[in-house]
C-alpha cells in the first residue's frame, strides 16, 4: 500500500493520480478503462485524485464522480477552477474573479456529485484580479462547507505569500520533474517556509521519463505535446538523449525509468506528492511501485548528474503559454 504524506493539514497518498489524460490531450477517452484505473488506484492506497473543471470541458469531473460514487470516503478529491479554455501550447483564457469562483465550485460539486471538495485549487492566476480577492472568495467556500482546503497552481513565491496571508494554502501544484526544475529556485523554499505541500504535475516530463522513447519520437496526431517546445525539432532529439541516460541509471538500479523519476521527486521533500497520470492499470501499478523505491544519496547524485539543472532543451510552453505561469 502506498504511504501517506501531509500537504499542510491535509493527508494524502505519497503518490496521487492525475486524471486529466482520461479526458483530453493524450488520445481518445475510454471511460470504462479509466474507471478501472481509478478503482485500482484506490485499492493500492493511491487515494489522491486530481481533476479540474476544464479537463474535457467537464467530462473529467463527471468521470471521476462516477468512479468514486460508492467509495467517496476512501478518496481525497482535488479539483480546480480558473481556466476557461485551453488554446494550445500552454496558452489559456482565465478568470479569477470572485463571481466566477463562486459559480465554478457549484458546477464542480454537481458534476462530481459530492457535497464537499477536499482540495480546491486556483488553476491559474488571473493577472487582472488581485490574488487577495480570488483567495478571499475561495476562503468563503471553506466557510460555507463546500471546500475543505485551498491550493494554487503555477504561481510565484510572492503570490504564494500573499495568498497564504488571506487563508492557509495547503498545496501548490506546479510542473516539477527531473526535466523541469524551475520550482526549486524561489518557489519551493517559500512553500517549505510556509508549510505548504507541493504537488508536482507532469512528474515524468510529460512522458519523456517513462522510457517509452519510441512514443516520444512518434507522437500521435492531436497529441498536445506537438505544440510544446521540448517536443519539437532539435529539442526533441536532445531531450530524448537525456532520457536515455535516465534509462541507463534505471537499468543499473533494477527499476524502471518512471520509477527513478518518481522516487527522485519523492526524495526531494517529505511534503511532496506527485500526481502522475495514466489511463492504463499496468502503468498505474508501475507508478505506485515507485513509492517503495528508496534512493541513496549517491544514487540521487548519479541521477542528477545525467540530467543536470538547465540541460533540457526548450521551454515548457510556447512564449504565450509561459506568460500564464509564475505569476
Image (spheres, rainbow, N blue to C red):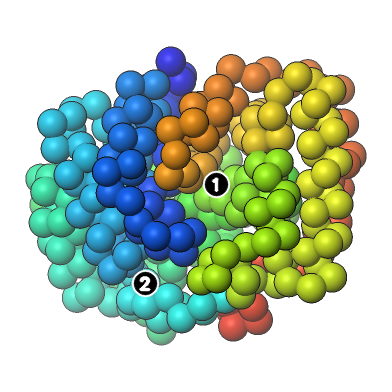
Looking at the image, do the residues carrying marks 2 and 1 touch, with CB atoms under 8 Å apart? no
Seen from the viewer's position, the closer of residues 103 and 256 is 256
Is residue 270 toward the left or the right of residue 295 in the image? left
Q: Quarter-wise, where is residue 131 in the image?
A: bottom left
**Residue that carries the numbered disc 2 in the rendered image:** 83
Q: Secondary structure at mark 1?
A: strand
Q: Quarter-wise, where is residue 53 in the image?
A: bottom left
Crowding at label 1, few (<14), some or many (≥20) Cα neighbours within 10 Å?
A: many
Is residue 214 toward the left or the right of residue 325 in the image? right
Where 198 falls versus 229 (above or below)?
above
- Residue at figure coordinates x 66%, y 54% from the top left: 215
How far apart marks 2 and 1 lie (CA) works out to 18 Å
- Residue 120 spot, x, y in % from top left: 30, 52
Crowding at label 2, few (<14), some or many (≥20) Cα neighbours within 10 Å?
A: many
- Residue at figure coordinates x 27%, y 43% from the top left: 32
Is residue 118 toward the left or the right of residue 178 in the image? left
- Residue at figure coordinates x 37%, y 77% from the top left: 85
Q: Quarter-wise, where is residue 130 in the image?
A: bottom left
- Residue 72 spot, x, y in % from top left: 18, 33
- Residue at figure coordinates x 76%, y 69% from the top left: 314
**Residue that carries the numbered disc 1 in the rendered image:** 200
- Residue 286 spot, x, y in % from top left: 55, 28
Considering only order in the chain, which callout, 1 or 2, is on the residue closer to the N terminus?
2
Amino acid at each position: 500500500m502506498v504511504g501517506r504524506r501531509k500537504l499542510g493539514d491535509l493527508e494524502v497518498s505519497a503518490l496521487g493520480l492525475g486524471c486529466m489524460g482520461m479526458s483530453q490531450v493524450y488520445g481518445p477517452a475510454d471511460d470504462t478503462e479509466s474507471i478501472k484505473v481509478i478503482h485500482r488506484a484506490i485499492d493500492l492506497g493511491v487515494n489522491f485524485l486530481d481533476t479540474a473543471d476544464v479537463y474535457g470541458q467537464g467530462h473529467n469531473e463527471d468521470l471521476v464522480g462516477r468512479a468514486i460514487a460508492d467509495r467517496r470516503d476512501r478518496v481525497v478529491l482535488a479539483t480546480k477552477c480558473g481556466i476557461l479554455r485551453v488554446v494550445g501550447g500552454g496558452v489559456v483564457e482565465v478568470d479569477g474573479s470572485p463571481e466566477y469562483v463562486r459559480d465554478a465550485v457549484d458546477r464542480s460539486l454537481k458534476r462530481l456529485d459530492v457535497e464537499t471538495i477536499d482540495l480546491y485549487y486556483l488553476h491559474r492566476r488571473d493577472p487582472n484580479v488581485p490574488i487577495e480577492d480570488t483567495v478571499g472568495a475561495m476562503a468563503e467556500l471553506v466557510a460555507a462547507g463546500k471546500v475543505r482546503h485551498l491550493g494554487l497552481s503555477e504561481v510565484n513565491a510572492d503570490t504564494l505569500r500573499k495568498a497564504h496571508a488571506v487563508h492557509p494554502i495547503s498545496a501548490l501544484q506546479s510542473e516539477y520533474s527531473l526535466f523541469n526544475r524551475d520550482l526549486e529556485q524561489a518557489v519551493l523554499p517559500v512553500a517549505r517556509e510556509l508549510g505548504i505541500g507541493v504537488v508536482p504535475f507532469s512528474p515524468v516530463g510529460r512522458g519523456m521519463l517513462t522510457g517509452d522513447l519510441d512514443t516520444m519520437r512518434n507522437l500521435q496526431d492531436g497529441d498536445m505535446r506537438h505544440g510544446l517546445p521540448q517536443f519539437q525539432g532539435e529539442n526533441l532529439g536532445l531531450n530524448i538523449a537525456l532520457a536515455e541516460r535516465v534509462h541507463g541509471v534505471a537499468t543499473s538500479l533494477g527499476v524502471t525509468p518512471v520509477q527513478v523519476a518518481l522516487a527522485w521527486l519523492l526524495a526531494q521533500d517529505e511534503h511532496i506528492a506527485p500526481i502522475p497520470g495514466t489511463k492504463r492499470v499496468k502503468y498505474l501499478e508501475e507508478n505506485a511501485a515507485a513509492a517503495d523505491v528508496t534512493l541513496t544519496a549517491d544514487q540521487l547524485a548519479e541521477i542528477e548528474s545525467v540530467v543536470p539543472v538547465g540541460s533540457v532543451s526548450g521551454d515548457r510552453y510556447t512564449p504565450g503559454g509561459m506568460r500564464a505561469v509564475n505569476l
